């Protein structure tokens, strides 16, 4: 059972980390693809063969020169010299990604041809092909033909930014994965505790069901064998035991309904003070047999509630208070609060913290289904309930709305 926490920690942490890594990979691919696309469109535009209606994101730099080698007196910048040397060595075709040192460029090395010169001039509409042949080409072609143009864009800053964002994202992914792993561990630990508590609950419930069954069986065998002759007394005992079993089974069924969300309320207007007195009346025998004194201070308060479910919740609270009271029971009602208290023995912090918890087994071995059901029924009405130590015992506070 103790492996659940580790499995959940690994599952939740791994799932979050894997998801973040997939997002990171997609981010890198999309961003780098977008940078390349923008660079290509910008270079195509400056070289005159791209979409004329597009507005390029970048403004490419242009290097113009003749020949393949650089002269000794060439005054070009270091970057331009490195790019010319790269093009001379690699002879790239079309738009190429170049990584030179720590810098990254997109570039195209283009050599101007005679056909491109004439096409450019005739496309402008100012010259006919014959005019160009006779005049312009004859004068300009020797000067222009063979010229090399390198259009380039430096995207080093963009790639460095993506790298920084990737590192930041990785750190956050690791942190989120670790946080998810811790959350999974804590959830797993709660599940393990819940499984253990439920196991204890069913063991105790089985014991509580088995006890009246054993008593009923014993009395039934006594009657059948003739050992027991006082059938009236035996009948009362059997009736009490069957009622105890019936209540326990009903509470277990209600727990199941609450867990599945199948419990619904049929509300009607109730006078709560009178309703609490009616809930207390069937318990007068238990109060008298234990010699308890009861203090009632019930004011006027009308509520809309389900009488059957509210009866069960209030009766469970009253039964619990009577069961553990040493000498007195206190019940009061005002506009906002219904208080039910008694002078029971002191509760430990752990018992007080888990007093309304399903399947919790206290130090006396009781399953505590009644208080858990009372709390859930009260909250189903939109109210709330708390338990706190009083000067001589405990008090349950139902806050109305």
Image (cartoon, rainbow, N blue to C red):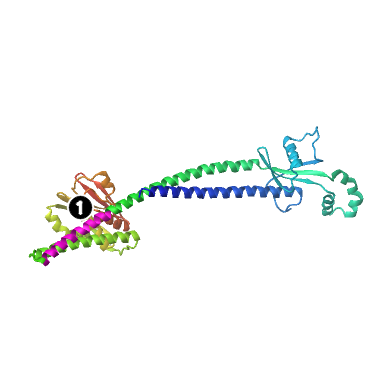
Per the image, is 325 magenta?
no
Per the image, is 216 magenta?
yes
Image coordinates of residue 237 in percent, x first then y, are 13, 62
Residue 52 lies left or right of residue 340; in this view the side is right
Q: Is residue 204 above or below residue 111?
A: below
Residue 345 lies left or right of residue 14; in this view the side is left
Depth check: 105 or 120 in front? 105
Query: Outermost residue, top direction?
Result: 73
Is residue 335 visible from the viewing direction of this image? no
Is residue 275 visible from the viewing direction of this image? yes
Residue span colored magenta: 201-224
Q: Say what secondary structure mark 1 lies in.
A: helix
Question: How many neighbours does mark 1 have within 10 angstroms: few (below 14), some (14-19), or many (20 or more)?
Answer: many
Residue with the mark numbered 1: 321
Q: Residue sitting at 26 percent across and 47 percent down?
A: 352
Q: Residue sitting at 28 percent across and 47 percent down?
A: 353
Residue 155 lies left or right of residue 384; in this view the side is right
Query: Outermost residue, front direction?
Result: 225
Image coordinates of residue 229 in percent, x first then y, are 7, 65
Depth check: 21 or 369 in front? 21
Query: Outermost residue, bottom direction?
Result: 224
Image coordinates of residue 312 in percent, x first then y, are 24, 60
Quadrant where the C terminus is found in the figure: bottom left
């Amino acid at each position: 059972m103790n492996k659940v926490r580790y499995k959940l920690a690994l599952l939740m942490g791994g799932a979050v980390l894997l998801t973040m890594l997939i997002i990171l990979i997609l981010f890198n691919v999309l961003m780098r693809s977008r940078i390349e696309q923008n660079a290509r469109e910008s270079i195509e535009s400056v070289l005159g063969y791209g979409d004329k209606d597009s507005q390029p994101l970048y403004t490419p730099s242009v290097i113009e020169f003749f020949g393949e080698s650089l002269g000794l007196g060439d005054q070009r910048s270091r970057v331009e010299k490195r790019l010319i040397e790269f093009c001379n060595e690699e002879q790239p075709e079309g738009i190429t990604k170049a990584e030179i040192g720590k810098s990254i460029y997109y570039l195209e090395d283009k050599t101007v041809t005679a056909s491109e010169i004439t096409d450019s001039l005739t496309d402008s509409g100012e010259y006919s092909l014959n005019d160009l042949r006779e005049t312009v080409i004859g004068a300009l072609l020797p000067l222009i033909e063979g010229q090399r143009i390198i259009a380039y864009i430096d995207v080093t800053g963009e790639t460095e930014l993506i790298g920084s964002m990737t590192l930041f994202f990785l750190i956050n992914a690791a942190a989120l994965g670790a946080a998810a792993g811790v959350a999974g561990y804590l959830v797993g630990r709660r599940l393990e505790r819940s499984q253990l508590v439920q196991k204890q609950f069913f063991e105790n419930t089985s014991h509580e069901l088995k006890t009246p069954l054993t008593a009923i069986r014993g009395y039934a065998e006594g009657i059948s064998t003739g050992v027991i002759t006082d059938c009236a007394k035996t009948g009362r005992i059997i009736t009490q035991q069957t009622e105890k079993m019936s209540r326990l089974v009903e509470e277990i069924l209600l727990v199941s309904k609450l867990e599945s969300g199948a419990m619904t309320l049929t509300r009607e207007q109730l006078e709560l003070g009178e309703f609490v007195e009616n809930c207390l009346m069937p318990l007068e025998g238990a109060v008298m047999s234990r010699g308890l004194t009861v203090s009632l201070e019930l004011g006027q308060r009308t509520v809309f509630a389900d009488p059957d479910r509210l009866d069960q919740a209030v009766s469970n609270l009253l039964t619990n208070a009577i069961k553990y009271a040493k000498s007195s029971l206190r019940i009061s009602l005002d506009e906002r609060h219904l208080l039910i208290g008694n002078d029971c023995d002191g509760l430990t912090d752990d018992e007080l913290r888990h007093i309304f918890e399903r399947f919790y087994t206290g130090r006396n071995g009781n399953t505590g289904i009644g208080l858990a059901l009372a709390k859930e029924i009260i909250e189903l009405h939109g109210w709330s309930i708390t338990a706190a130590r009083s000067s001589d015992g405990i008090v349950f506070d139902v806050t109305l709305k």
